């Protein structure tokens, strides 16, 4: 098993924080690097601690569920697929897509099924940073609604809540959910206390430098930024910075994400085969409308793509429908690719990219049970070679972010 330094230096770290929570050393904390990513402190681990790292780190490998019924090569475990939205207009408007994750979170807390939802929102001391919080009211959850395209380490904050014996839901990136699943294999408190694991589709984590670049493009000095949102208040919504004097500057989603933020992704995201939350109970995404295989990003009423992955996730979805938290329409699995074409290419090219990392650096993450080789065989060989070549070139640096 590689050391912490090896994982970080070779671009395998997702920044989830699972290692810091599971190992539990005061000197092993997540911190922002000069490149703008959250990484664990490079401490030397004892043999027992190294075994814990091997058990919980999702960055160095995943064991998928391809052997289970209902596994789709592109989309992972699928129990049901739908599009939908929050029936509360304020929740739908505030969310990044249709507000379904926020509606589910509000409903779970209001019904007493969980005490709170562990999720991320803007940090109090810096609006472009993320902070993990235990959101226990509608207002708290509305404040955390909307995508946050910045580094976060929600698993680093999980231990105090587990130690307190509290029952809560968890919302996170696919790698966070995967890390939580790995932690659960050695910590029975997780399955007992976290009945719902909810994910959103992820195209990668931009660095803090990416958000600073957005602010620069908006003409807003970082020190003058009082609040910052990446999306929401419409679909897809605007990237919006508010200055301390109350004035605002904004840009559309296609400009902020499509021309700035996606150029600052951490390396591990570029070789990730799970952008869709395969280890969650339920995953949500933008149910984009598009033309010729590409989303048009026109402003509309929000619409979420909803994939129930487990029986528990499906039961939650049915309960939400019965209680009127959300409204849905069924969707054929084949339609997901039209709404999320990037995720199709991402997983289909993962095998070639991972092979290139191995050639370039002599190390790689190990992904099993995710149908990656079969997907690679179904793709254009020219496209696979291009992906491998590009990844090989990026992997030749001394260290990767």
Image: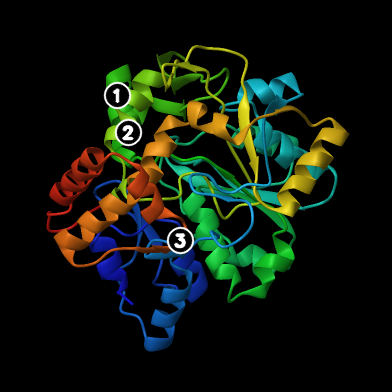
Which residue is tagged 2? 262
Q: Nearer the viewer, residue 397 or 347?
A: 347
Q: Which of the two labelled residues, at mark 3 and mark 2, occupies the earlier sequence position?
A: 3
Classify mark 1: residues with Cα within 10 Å, few (<14), some (14-19) or many (20+).
Answer: few
Which residue is tagged 1? 259
For marks 1 and 3, give the CA distance: 29 Å
Kindly identify the residue that appears in the image at 29 percent across and 27 percent down.
260
Q: Where does the image place residue 209, in percent across and percent down from the top left?
A: 28, 38
Which label lies toward us, 1 or 3?
Answer: 1
- Element class at badge 3: loop
Q: Are marks 1 and 2 in contact (CB under 8 Å)?
A: yes
Kindly identify the residue that appears in the image at 27 percent across and 51 percent down.
352
Q: Where does the image place residue 297, in percent across and percent down from the top left?
A: 46, 17
- Element class at badge 2: helix
Classify mark 3: residues with Cα within 10 Å, few (<14), some (14-19) or many (20+).
Answer: many
- Element class at badge 1: helix
Which label lies toward us, 3 or 2?
Answer: 2
Residue 338, above or below 48 = above
Which residue is tagged 3? 17
Left or right of 153, for residue 143: right
For marks 3 and 2, give the CA distance: 22 Å
Q: Where does the image place residue 258, in percent across and percent down from the top left?
A: 34, 25
Residue 154 shows in the view: no
Q: Which of the two labelled residues, at mark 1 and mark 3, occupies the earlier sequence position?
A: 3
Kindly identify the residue that appears in the image at 26 percent across and 69 percent down.
5
Q: Nearer the viewer, residue 188 or 75?
A: 75
Q: Quadrant of residue 358?
A: bottom left
Residue 179 shows in the view: yes
Kindly identify the residue that appears in the image at 30 percent across and 46 percent down.
36
């Amino acid at each position: 098993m590689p050391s912490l330094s090896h994982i970080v230096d070779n671009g395998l770290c997702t920044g989830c924080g699972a290692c810091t929570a599971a190992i539990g050393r005061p000197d092993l904390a997540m911190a922002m690097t000069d490149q703008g990513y959250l990484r664990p402190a490079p401490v030397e681990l004892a043999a027992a601690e190294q075994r814990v790292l091997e058990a919980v780190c999702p960055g160095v490998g995943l064991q998928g569920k391809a052997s289970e019924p209902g596994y789709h090569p592109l989309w992972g475990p699928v129990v049901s697929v739908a599009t939908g939205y929050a029936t509360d207009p304020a929740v739908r408007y505030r969310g990044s897509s249709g507000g379904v994750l926020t509606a589910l979170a509000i409903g779970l807390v209001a019904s007493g099924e969980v005490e709170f939802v562990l999720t991320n929102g803007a940090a109090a001391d810096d609006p472009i940073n993320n902070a993990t919080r235990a959101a226990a009211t509608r207002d708290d959850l509305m404040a955390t609604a909307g995508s946050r395209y910045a580094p976060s380490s929600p698993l680093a904050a999980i231990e105090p809540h587990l130690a307190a014996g509290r029952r809560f839901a968890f919302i996170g990136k696919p790698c966070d959910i995967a890390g939580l699943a790995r932690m659960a294999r050695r910590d029975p408190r997780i399955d007992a206390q976290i009945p719902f694991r909810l994910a959103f589709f992820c195209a990668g984590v931009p660095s803090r430098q990416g958000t600073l670049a957005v602010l620069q493009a908006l003409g807003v000095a970082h020190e003058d930024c009082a609040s910052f949102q990446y999306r929401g208040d419409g679909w897809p919504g605007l990237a919006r910075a508010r200055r301390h004097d109350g004035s605002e500057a904004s840009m559309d989603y296609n400009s902020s994400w499509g021309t700035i933020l996606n150029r600052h992704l951490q390396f591990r995201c570029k070789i990730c085969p799970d952008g869709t939350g395969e280890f969650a109970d339920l995953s949500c995404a933008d149910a984009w409308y598009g033309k010729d295989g590409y989303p048009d990003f026109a402003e509309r009423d929000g619409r979420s793509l909803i994939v129930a992955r487990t029986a528990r996730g499906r039961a939650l979805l049915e309960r939400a429908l019965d209680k009127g938290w959300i409204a849905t329409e069924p969707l054929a699995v084949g339609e997901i690719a039209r709404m999320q074409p990037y995720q199709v290419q991402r997983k289909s090219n993962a095998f070639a990219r991972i092979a290139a990392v191995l050639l370039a650096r002599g190390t790689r993450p190990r992904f099993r049970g995710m149908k990656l080789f079969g997907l690679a065989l179904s793709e254009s060989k020219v496209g696979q070679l291009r992906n491998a070549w590009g990844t090989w070139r990026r992997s030749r640096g001394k260290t990767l972010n």
